[in-house]
Each structure stands twice: as C-alpha cells, then as structure tokens.
Image (cartoon, rainbow, N blue to C red):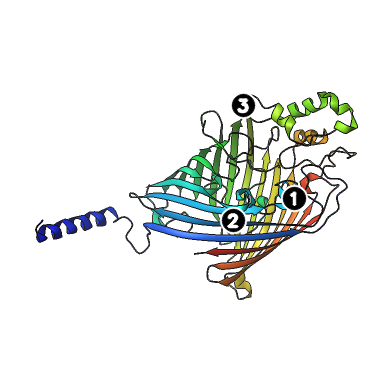
Amino acid sequence: MPQFLVRRLAVSVLCSLAAVGAWAQTPETEDTTARYQLTYNWQHHDAFRASYSGANSLSPQSERMYTFSTTAHWGFRPWQDGELYFDPEIASGIPFSGNLVGLGGFTNGEITRAGGSVPKLYRQRLFVRQTWNHGGEQEQIASDFNQMAGRVDRNRFVLTAGNFSTLDVFDDNAYAKDPRTQFMNWGNWTYAAYDYAADARGFGWGFAGEWYQDNWVLRFGRMTGPKEPNGLPVDFALGKHYGDQVEIERGHMLADQPGKVRVLAWRNRAQVASFNDATQLLQNRACMQTSSCATETTPQALIDVRGSEKIKYGLGVNVEQTINPSVGFFLRAMKADGRTETYAFTEADGSLSTGLVFKGGLWGRADDAVGVAFLHNTLSRDRRNFLAAGGMSFFIGDASANATTALTYKPEQILEAFYSFQMTHGTWLTTDYQRIQNPAYNADRGPINVYALRFHAEF
C-alpha cells in the first residue's frame, strides 16, 4: 500500500477514535477507571456471661475472627453517557464461633463475603449504567469506586442494570455506609431490618432507575434473591421471586448546612416460611412433650413449612445532616412486617441506628475520623413466639435441651465507636469497639465486648 494511503488511513482512524471519545476527553471527565482496595479486619471478643448456649449461640469463650478482601474496580465508557463496570474480588475469613451465628447486628460487614481461610476469587459486580440528561444546571460527579468523574445535568434519569448490590443504589448515607472505612456493624451501614434481596454475599441481578429533579430523587428497582433463603445460588425467576424497592430522597439546607432525608419502602416475594406455621408445627410434634426433644438444633421446622410464595415488606427512614463542616449526624429507622423468616440479610424486624461522625480537622488531622453510634434491634411477636417454642433459625436460636427457657427476650442494643487514622496517602488504620447487650435478643447472655483493628488501602 502506498505510504500516503497508510498515513491517510491512520489519520482517519485517529479522527474516528477522537470523535468516539469526544464526550469523555475533557479535564473533568474520565473515560476509563481502574481503582483497587484491600481491607483486613481483625476482631476479638472477651469471654462473657451465658446462662446457657444452643446450636446457634455465639461462644461465650474468648474468640478471634478475621476477614480479608481485595477488589479491582474496572470501568470504561462504551458510548456517550454510558458506563460499564466489572469488579473481581478475592475474599477470605472466619467468623466468631466458626459460623455466622449468635447476633442480629453482626460486628463485621465484610464477613458475608468470606467463605473460609482459603482466599476465593469471584465476580462481585458486572453492570452497565446509562444517564439521560434532562437539563438544568450541571454538576460535577467525583471520581470514586464504580464511578467515573464527569459532568451531568442536575435533572436526569439514570438506569443501572446487571450484577450489583441493592445498596449500591439505595440507602446511601454520607456518614454510615461503608464497613471498610466507617462503622463496621451491619446495622450501621444499612438498616438491620432491611431484608434486601441478594445472594449470600450481598449481590444480585436486576435493575434500578433514578430520576433526579432539582432537590428530589426518586429511585425504584427489582433485584434477584437466593433460590433458598440465605443461600448463594441466585433465583433468576424475576417474574415470580424478587425484591422490589422504592425510595424518595429530598435534599435540604438546615441552618445553612446540607442534609438529606430518604424514605424507603421494600417488598419481597419468595418461597419463605411463615413463623406462625413453623411454631404450629413445633407445638404439634409429639417429641415436644419430652424434655429430651424440647428444642431444635437446626432450622428444620422453617424448611418443612416452606411452600407457596409469601410477601415480606418494610418501611424505613434515613437521615443525614451536616452540623458543621467537621461534624455530621445520621439516623436510620425501619420496621418490617416480621411474619416470615429472613430471606437474605439478618435477623431483625425493627431497627434503629443513630450517631455522629467527627472529621479530624477538629484536631489538626484532616483525613482522620471518629464515629460513635447506638443501635437498637427488635424482633416481631411472630418470630419471638417461634424462638420461645424452641425453634431455630439460620443465625439465631439459643435454645438447648438443657435450657429452662428458650428465649428471655429483650431488644438487642449495641454501642459502636471507631477512630480512623490515616497512615499515609491512601492507607488507614482503624480501631473499633462494640458493646452488645442482649446478643441475639437474649437477656440471659452477654454483654459482649468486641475489639477490632482494621487496615484499609485504596489505590
């Protein structure tokens, strides 16, 4: 081929590529992203008082646990206003007592992704995001994990579809969201009573739409749940079994400081057990008449009464409020109907978490942070009656054959405080303390003191 034709072809290709990437090639806009994180979380609890223990009890002996995760967040813009992301992750870890039992508010948000001491590689996310701009003032989107820097209209519609977490879109909060950098307890990074549809690691397939209009945001979406409650295999029958959620967000200014209020409603449809059905089954069994067969050691009663699809739902409110540039306040409160077993998250039918976060600029360390929070988790009457009858669910159930009572119910209450210390640019060391009253809603056990040390790196 003549040399001038080669040059003309090269120029033509370069011009075409430049035209394709024209929407992204500006100083404020990324067209690719590659970000990584690594987190190691070590925790210890002291020995604590326990009048009795069952198959799903946290061990009253002193114990240690850990989690490790490292994640790649890769993305690019395949077309204008479109984004495609892929996140592979390697995770490992061992919970307290060798199994994820004995609490409603678990102490480490990473433990759902850990499957033993051998690190496992899995696909965490694979999703596409499309933005349709609808006018109004433009605002800058900052670069972050699974988010490329760019400018968007204040009024816009955003669609996310594929493999991701419900919590990627819903229930955001500036002060209590990420267990890798902020509070560690499950009830502080989302509502403990939010039984959101997901596999055992916390992810699923589905879609979510977000409509931004001035200070308002409307979100809606449908996600897959597990084939069996709390399982890893995903049920792709989205027409029959699913988790729906709708959230309304309102931004505001209070005493010249920004804040947001979110109201979230959710509804699951799945093959799950009714607590009343399972309680009736336990009471009808002949073995319930003898002390040697007074309680279960597995959730068999729940499994035995699963049949037709059932509905589970809840409603919650989420508040974040800047008090001043260095202090922020958050609150979450949710109530679920509590008639059916846990589908995909944890054992709570009512939850409240509230606290304060202080930025290190107050004491001359701008990238440090201190947080303190209080949590209050409750169970529905149906779930309490099931446990009192000697029932065993997947995560809680302290009843034992030698117990004089299956459950001395009291709400589970947790105090959590942390200090995040920036070691170098992109690395933090966090100390964390959690005190748990009435673990697994049982006044005959606890309190428990949990101490944690977390290393986190971003690059």
Task: Point out which mark residue 309 bears.
Answer: 3
Q: What residue type is labelled 3?
A: Glu
Q: How crowded is mark 2: few (under 14 residues within 10 Å), some or many (20 or more)?
A: some
Between the C-alphas of marks 3 and 1, the distance is 33 Å
Q: Earlier in the sequence, mark 2 or mark 1?
A: 1
For disc 2, the marked residue is 178
Q: Earlier in the sequence, mark 3 or mark 1?
A: 1
Residue 226 in which image quadrant:
top right
Give residue 255's position: percent from left, percent from top: 59, 61
In the image, 269: left or right of 54? Answer: left
Q: What residue type is labelled 2?
A: Asp
Image position of 272 with respect to 138: above or below: above
> Is the Cβ of the residue at disc 2 closer than 8 Å to that at disc 3?
no
Give residue 200's position: percent from left, percent from top: 61, 43
Front position in the image: 267 or 214: 267
**What residue is drawn where x is 64% and y is 36%?**
229
Question: Is residue 114 shown to the viewer in this render?
Answer: yes
Front position in the image: 212 or 374: 374
For disc 1, the marked residue is 97
**What residue is drawn where x is 55% and y is 64%?**
457
Give the secondary structure at mark 1: helix
In the image, 5: left or right of 379? Answer: left
Image position of 256 with respect to 104: above or below: below
Q: Nearer the viewer, mark 2 or mark 1?
A: 1
**What residue is drawn where x is 70% and y is 35%?**
338
Give residue 149's position: percent from left, percent from top: 41, 59
